[in-house]
Amino acid sequence: MGGCYSSDLNKPPDVGEPAKRAKQSNIVVLTELSDLEDDDAVLKEPTKFTYRGRGSNSVGIMQPLQKERVEKELKEIQKESNKEVRRKQELQLQFLTETEQKSQEVLQKEKERRREIFKVDDNIKGLATVDEAEEVWTNPNKIIESRVYRPQQFNLTGITNSGWGLEVQELGDDPEPKPPTYRKKDIVPNLNEFNMFDKHAVKAPVNAKASVSTLVNYFKSAAENHFQLVRMFYRWITFNISFDIEGYFGEKMLQSVDAEDVLQTGYTISEGYANLMEAMCRFEGIPVKVIYGVVKGYDHQVGDIVSFTESSILHYWNAVYINRNWFFIDCTWGAGHMDKQRKWHRKFQEFYFIVDPDKMIVDHFPYMDGDFRESARWQLLPSPVSANSFNQRLKMEKAALEWEVKPVTHTQHHIITVRKTIVVQLEEVASILEDYTVQFQRKDGSRNLDKFFFACKLNERTLKIEIRPPEEVDYLLNIFAQKSLDAAGESELLVTYILKCVEVLETIRQFPTNFRIFGAVPDYAKYGFCSDITKCCEYTCSSGELILPLKTKRNVAGMTKLEHITENKDLTNYCLITTKERGISIKMRFPFEGYFKFTLFGKQDASSGFRPVATFLIDCDQSSHVHSGFPVAFEAALELKCTLYKPLWKDLPSNSTVVIIMGCPNIARASVMYQDLVKDENGIFEGTVNTPPAGQPFTIYGQKTSDGPLVGLFHFTIF
């Protein structure tokens, strides 16, 4: 079966001659009476008869009976004439109806033929590997059969009701540049929908690149519309064309930027990438524009002023017109990137296929033929950005644009003047990031300042960074994020600010250092906690003790760690976890004033180990009058939901009398030093016990049943 063209009504000519765009429609319009010829659609006037009398001697006056008979004959003749006109009209309509039905049958057969071509193959998953593609290129005689999924399974475009079908433009010039009415996420909500087209593109056989026309025709065998076709153009170019790094820097002769030459050599600069995309689109009759201008590229530093006279920053990209909308595509940056050592690395970038205009203008500024006014139209923005604004505006990095991370507090400029202290906030639109990393340092790089900033999650989507610069100098604030914490996840730069400090605090309190930002981890729910754990990450304590209640979805296993910013004392027992109904309560005691870092650990399941769930900053302005930690709570105390009311300090004097009060409705018996505690109707155990000599064990035990084993609940130290 032959390849599936964009439309049989606009089938491209033979190889070597580009297709012309022509007005077309796959919809057959019902014909009405107004579509008939003028002669058939108008009721004809009946033939006029003139009565001339009976003979030459007639005076021309009809008798009454004769007049009545003539009028009757005239009505019969008019009636017959009208019937003939209607008969012709009905025949014409019948012919047009049959033609319409035949057109519908042809269209249905074409749909069935395409569905047969696009048959399902469940063994095909994901993109083709580099090894598979290399096998095709190294073996020119090997032709790989095109096998793809049915496009109806995806939300890209369909023949019937998706709205993204083939649309051929009218003859004439390309459409005027206007802001698109769609955003990329509206067109392609799931990027996996591209997999079948990407696989077909990277597996193109070597003989397909004989010319632009043969390559485009190969792609058309797996495409039902222009959107799918342009996607395959982009994937093939980014997979097969390398950046001519030596020619770009003048180390060798620059490779040709002509589309056919780029196709054969496989090397070019940005102009060649854009020309090849243009040639492919033009052959298929898709309106396309080659745009060039200045960019904030590989060697751009925050604070640099882009000069519009330097040819070294000239860059080319495309705008492609699909479904009455212009969309940006940058094949050069989509194929890979150049590092600061001027080495090019091939790395496919999904981001640069269909780039929203407000994201493109961050680092791409059209500047063609030295005409700012005309070039501004190709920003595709409702309000174009000026050259001065392009230089000064905040540059969010590609990862921030791709992950939908936006500034909350400082949205316009990357240079910020700081007086004493500053707070910077970023917000995620989709809440998909696993972790953040903040780097605060002098601009000259001479000093890292981890203790002069505090970064935390205000909620599940908002990052807050508070900074207290120690000197009146310039600083760099780099904010990184990580989408996945597994081995494949990489930390990506989101944004860089330049902080110009003109005034510092008289007394600067340093923050505790933290390996990660303060707040709850994104997957806190896996540890059994509810969303209230994300509500706050910093607390102030004025009494020396703090109680932190947290809701849980199930019984949780927990551990705690409390650290002071300067004191190097072991504070292991200065936290006590008590299990409540649908939650836990954490009591903290602070023996010093100043900043404390509190870390809560949890388990995802019984077989896993303890991992950090949340980290909190606590500012204590008054230390506790109790200079002892809490008793040690065993794991059984959490499982049985035991609450200790007295005594709430770990160290007890020897040979003294203490009152013990403990609530635990889930045990039948509690005892200390072989002495049973009395239980009331509310499940509260109470008793007065004498402590042993110093150094002897003193533990509260419990039994779930009267004849069950004893389990340790709380342990004290006797001094």
Image (cartoon, grey):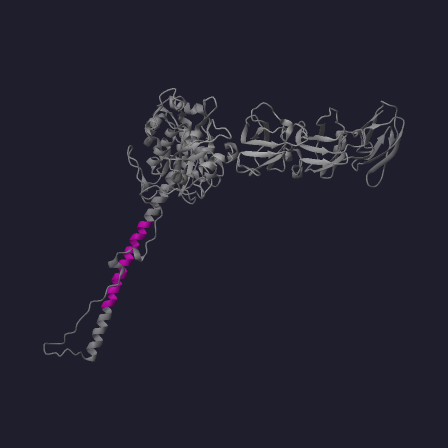
Q: How many marks?
A: 0
Q: Is residue 361 visible?
A: no
- Quadrant where the N terminus is found in the figure: top left
Q: Is residue 578 magenta?
A: no
Q: Position of residue 576 (x, y in %)?
A: 76, 32
In front of the other: 668 or 584: 584
In front of the other: 337 or 490: 337
Q: Position of residue 204 (x, y in %)?
A: 38, 28
Is residue 283 found left or right of 356 in the rendered image?
left
In front of the other: 287 or 308: 308
Is residue 412 found left or right of 691 in the rendered image?
left
Answer above or below: position of 56 versus 362: below
Residue at (28% x, 32% y) in the render:
16
Q: Position of residue 602 (x, y in %)?
A: 68, 31
Q: Is residue 424 visible?
A: yes
Which quadrant holds residue 148? Answer: top left
Q: Position of residue 321 (x, y in %)?
A: 39, 40
User: Which SS type dominates the magenta stretch?
Assistant: helix
- Quadrant where the C terminus is found in the figure: top right
Taking the view exactly as shown, the residue that stands out farthest to the left is 56
Which quadrant holds residue 141? Answer: top left
Which quadrant holds residue 506? Answer: top right
Q: Is residue 83 magenta?
A: yes
Chain part drawn in magenta: 77-100
Is residue 282 found left or right of 413 in the rendered image?
left
Taking the view exactly as shown, the residue that stands out farthest to the top is 251
In front of the other: 223 or 658: 658
Is residue 132 found left or right of 44 in the rendered image?
right
